[in-house]
Image (cartoon, rainbow, N blue to C red):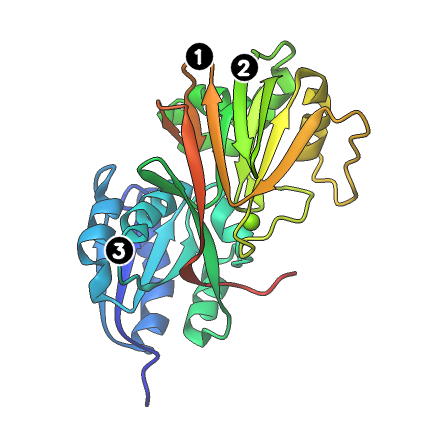
């Protein structure tokens, strides 16, 4: 029998629900063992673990499987993205939102997600975005997005799920704070007063699919500058899961597509990358086209 893989690293979130991880691993490990010569299972203990193991040992494997939510994926992407020789990557959705897995059409059912790894018929070279000395795979946001995550306290995040926070925050904010931002892209510079800046590489935020064509292989970021007058529209955009066109005749949401975008705020703003908060707001975002080879699902 020919093996699909020689060495697999499975990184799983050790902080998953009590006993849950063990149950999931019973579904995950046997079919994977059938397809590889050796497999290492690394259970993370603390924040930073997944990133460290991926950075230090990622080059030794031909496949790294990240089993966890967007936080674990964010860490692993940051560990792997800077390696010269990067392994193939697969995601097993073990979190609340699983936004990056959704963007890749990975099934939300764990057994089905394992199946697409063991059959490995579909792989794609996916864009990853460098933001300062960090990387993100799904989104970068400032304004409402970061305020939203700011209000999430870690204890209840796992219980209720991030999604409920995104929803309640979007619904409850009546008078959003204004940010003065300068955005340079494609040789143009725009100054605007906005309530939110969202740069999307992936297609899902807080488990809400964005109702626009966002391509993870085009080498371009989709940046949305949402003016205060565009806020109700943005709510509609993210909340309603609209599959139709969201029209914006008044240009209350400015949409930019670019391979590199520089974003400067007048005041210090916290930014949210893939659901993780960072203090440094001013950044240049650079798309690394086709930077990571990922196992993907079929588009439904
Ligand atoms: Mg793109």
Q: Are marks 2 and 1 in contact (CB under 8 Å)?
A: yes
Q: Residue 71, relative to residue 60: is it above or below?
A: above
Q: Name the spot of residue 220 as percent of width and height, x first.
A: 55, 48
Residue 267, numbered circle: 1
Say what secondary structure mark 2 lies in.
strand
Please give the residue where the numbered disc 3 appears in the rendered image. Answer: 83
Tell me which residue sits at (35%, 49%) in the image. 77
Please give the residue where the numbered disc 2 appears in the rendered image. Answer: 180
Q: Residue 80, relative to residue 6: is it above or below?
A: above
Tell me which residue sits at (44%, 12%) in the image. 267
Q: Is tag 2's residue or tag 1's residue first in the polypeptide sequence?
A: 2
Calculate the distance from the C-alpha at mark 2 to the C-alpha at mark 3.
Answer: 36 Å
Q: Name the spot of residue 231 as percent of width and height, x first.
A: 68, 21
Q: Residue most toward the front?
A: 187
Q: Are marks 3 and 1 in contact (CB under 8 Å)?
A: no
Say what secondary structure mark 3 lies in.
loop
Q: Residues within 10 Å of mark 2 (few under 14, many from 20)?
A: few
Calculate the distance from the C-alpha at mark 2 to the C-alpha at mark 1.
Answer: 7 Å
Q: Residues within 10 Å of mark 1 (few under 14, many from 20)?
A: few
Q: Residue most toward the right?
A: 249
Q: Is tag 2's residue or tag 3's residue first in the polypeptide sequence?
A: 3
Taking the image as shown, residue 162 lies to the left or right of residue 53, namely right
């Amino acid at each position: 029998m020919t093996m699909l893989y020689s060495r697999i690293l499975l990184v799983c979130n050790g902080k998953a629900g009590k006993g849950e991880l063990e149950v999931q691993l019973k579904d995950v490990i046997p079919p994977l063992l059938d397809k590889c010569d050796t497999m290492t299972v690394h259970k993370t203990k603390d924040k930073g673990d997944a990133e460290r193991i991926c950075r230090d040992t990622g080059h030794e494997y031909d496949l790294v499987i990240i089993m966890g939510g967007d936080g674990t994926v964010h860490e692993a992407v940051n560990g792997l993205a800077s390696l010269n020789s990067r392994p193939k990557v697969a995601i097993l959705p073990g979190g609340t939102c699983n936004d990056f897995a959704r963007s890749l059409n990975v099934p939300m059912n764990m057994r089905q997600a394992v199946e697409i790894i063991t059959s490995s018929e579909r792989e794609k070279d996916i864009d990853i975005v460098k933001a300062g000395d960090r990387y993100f795979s799904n989104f970068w946001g400032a304004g409402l997005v970061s305020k939203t995550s700011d209000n999430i306290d870690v204890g209840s995040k796992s219980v209720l799920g991030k999604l409920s926070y995104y929803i309640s925050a979007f619904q409850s904010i009546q008078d959003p704070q204004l940010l003065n931002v300068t955005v340079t892209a494609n040789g143009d510079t725009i100054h605007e007063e906005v309530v939110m800046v969202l740069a999307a590489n992936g297609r899902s935020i807080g488990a809400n699919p964005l109702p626009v064509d966002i391509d993870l292989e085009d080498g371009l970021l989709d940046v949305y500058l949402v003016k205060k007058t565009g806020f109700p529209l943005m709510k509609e955009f993210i909340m309603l899961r609209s599959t139709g066109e969201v029209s914006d005749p008044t240009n209350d949401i400015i949409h930019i597509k670019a391979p590199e975008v520089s974003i400067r705020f007048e005041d210090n703003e916290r930014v949210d990358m893939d659901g993780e908060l960072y203090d440094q707001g001013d950044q240049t975002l650079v798309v690394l086209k086709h930077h990571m080879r990922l196992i993907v699902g079929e588009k439904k």
